Amino acid sequence: NGTNAYLIEDLFLAGFKPLEPILLFCKVSTGHEEPALSNLRLKSLIEILSLMDEQDNWCYVFDEKDNEYKPIQTSEKITLSPEKKFIELSETIQEEVEDFEDDIIYEDDDNEDFHETAQISELKAQKVALQKIIQAQEEQRNAAMAVIENQRRLGRNIFENCPSTIVADTNCYIDHLALMQALLQSKMFCIVVPLIVINELDGLKKGSSNTNHRLQQSAGLAVDMLEDWFSRKDSCLRAITSNGTEMTTIAFRAEEFSNDRGNNDDVILSCCVRYCKENITRSEGDSRIVLRSVVLLTDDRNLRVKAHTRSVPTTDIVTFIKMAKLI
């Protein structure tokens, strides 16, 4: 006799097929619900743990085709940290040594020495290797903490951006040519064009059999616009080489690039860094106020991350145009 009682978590997960298509329940009498449900919960946990153990590191993903969760096997076993491995290995070695000592038969009462088995020697070698790994990790942590402490001691830099120089990456000229033209026509900023950007636009303009036609056309329009503006000898426009030499013409724009300068993004960023003079205007407490007069315009998130690590102000061109109230 009694009523059927169900676990609240089973009711919540009803229909989750990897667990159980049929709800487990137990018969309970009035006033004895809690003990009965506790026993049922323990039974359910034991069953699911046994299932997970049998499946050997499986997990479940939702199959949209069959509209249900299905088990898949992960590519790697879950590994312990070196510290936990070291502790487990130490315990294993101790157990092996104790078992070995228990099995030793001493032929001579005066000679109680014994030779290590190959298994114990191998375990000890693993222990030494793990000790080295743990020591290396500890040294890395100490080095990181030293850097953090040094930065705390030096104080925090606060950057105030007063942009007068703009550097844009290649995609700004391809995807936002009208906005770049608006920046040039505003005469509010000096537009600096790295030669690597112009050379990249030239390459896209020439194209190849695999080049997207729209991309080729956009690059051609960008090159035509830059050549037109440079021909006007506009004081708000200049080119810059990878070595930092400024130019007022792009008639001679061929440039050799060595591999040690990194990829195109690295060269563009290095051009920006040349305009980042350490102009510390004042201090507030432990912080230093540093002025920045250059802004890197790019939609590339990776390039923006690189710029932040070099303390170069950066944003996308649409946001900057709005901040400058040009649209």
Image (cartoon, rainbow, N blue to C red):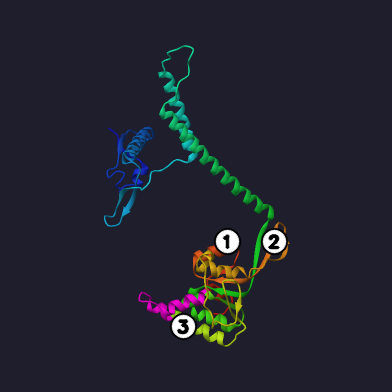
Most foreground residue, 86 or 40:
86
Tag 3: amino acid = Leu
Q: Label 2 neighbourhood size at 10 Å, few (<14), some (14-19), many (20+)? A: some
Quote the CA–CA distance across marks 3 and 1: 33 Å
Magenta stretch mostly in which secondary structure? helix
What is the secondary structure assignment of the residue under circle 2?
strand
Q: Is residue 84 left or right of residue 48?
A: right
Amino acid marked by disc 1: Thr
Residue 48 on image: x %, y %: 33, 39
Where does label 3 land, which residue?
A: 221
Kind of residue at badge 2: Arg
Q: Nearer the viewer, residue 52 or 85?
A: 85
Residue 258 circle label: none
In the rendered image, the quadrant that contains the C terminus is bottom right
Judging by the rendered image, the residue that carries numbered circle 1 is: 309
Q: Which mark is residue 288?
A: 2
Residue 216 drawn in magenta: yes
Mark 2 to mark 3 CA distance (whole Å) = 44 Å
**Callout 3: 10 Å neighbours few (<14), some, many (20+)?**
some
Of the numbered discs 3 and 1, the one sitting upstream in the chain is 3
Residue drawn 62% across and 83% down?
235
